[in-house]
Image (spheres, rainbow, N blue to C red):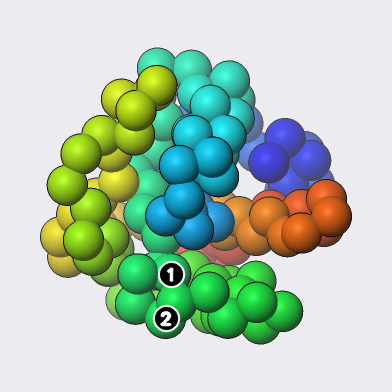
């Protein structure tokens, strides 16, 4: 995530929304939310994961999530996480849980794969 910000020439406060990797597993969601807190501090941007809509598409997950991130920007929308009821234990973070319109400028999309194939992309409105 830090590398994506550096590459984009942005600061953490510039990110409007995060499309989290968010597999819905305790270990992954806790680890990702701790990383978001470490990078963004008390100002973690709105975030959610699209896997509740698509399931985990394995090798295609990063590309599918990038498309969702672009749709977030183009349509000015955040698609809430499905079936999420409790804050993430250990961090208290909670994704957006329902659809909302939003003025988004910079969206980060996280894709954390098996074996350390981890990537974060930043997409910006034109």
Position of residue 88 measured from the top left corner of the image (x, y, whole percent):
34, 34
Q: Residues within 10 Å of mark 2 (few under 14, many from 20)?
A: few
Depicted 9 relative to depicted 93: above or below: below
Vertical side of 12 occupied by 104: above or below:
below
Name the mark on residue 51.
1
State the count of labels.
2
Please state the horizontal and vertical placement of residue 11, each as a whole percent of the image: 61, 31
Q: Nearer the viewer, residue 29 or 73?
A: 29
Cα separation, mark 1 vs mark 2, equals: 5 Å
The local crowd at label 1, few if under 14, some if 14 to 19, many if 20 or more residues have their Cα within 10 Å, is: many
- What SS does tag 2 mark? helix
Q: Residue at x 48, y 17 (%)?
A: 41
Q: Which residue is mark 2?
A: 54
Name above or below for residue 80 compared with residue 118: below
The answer to which quarter of the image holds residue 64 is bottom right
The residue drawn where x is 17% and y is 65% is 99
**How far from the left and from the top, in percent, is residue 87?**
25, 34
Q: Position of residue 98 (x, y in %)?
A: 15, 60
> Taking the image as drawn, is residue 59 in sight?
yes
Residue at figure coordinates x 83%, y 50% from the top left: 116
Q: Which residue, as the protein is rendered here, is positioned at the far front?
A: 26
Quarter holding the N terminus is: top right
Is residue 63 in sight in this rendering? no
Q: Which label belongs to residue 66?
A: none
Residue 68 left/right relative to 78: right
* Left or right placement of residue 101 versus residue 72 in this view: left
Could you say whether the residue bearing mark 1 is in a helix, strand or loop? helix
Q: Quadrant of residue 117?
A: bottom right
Q: Residue at x 77, y 53 (%)?
A: 118
Asked if disc 1 and disc 2 are in contact, CB closer than 8 Å, the reply is yes
As drawn, 18 above or below 3: below
């Amino acid at each position: 995530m830090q590398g994506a910000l550096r590459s984009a020439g942005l600061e953490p406060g510039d990110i409007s929304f995060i499309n989290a990797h968010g597999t819905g597993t305790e270990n992954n969601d806790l680890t990702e939310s701790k990383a978001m807190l470490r990078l963004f501090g008390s100002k973690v941007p709105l975030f959610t994961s699209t896997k509740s809509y698509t399931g985990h598409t394995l090798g295609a997950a990063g590309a599918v999530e990038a498309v969702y991130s672009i749709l977030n920007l183009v349509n000015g929308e955040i698609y809430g996480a499905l079936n999420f009821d409790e804050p993430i234990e250990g961090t208290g973070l909670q994704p957006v849980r329902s659809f909302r319109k939003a003025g988004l400028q910079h969206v980060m999309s996280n894709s954390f794969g098996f074996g350390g194939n981890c990537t974060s992309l930043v997409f910006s409105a034109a």
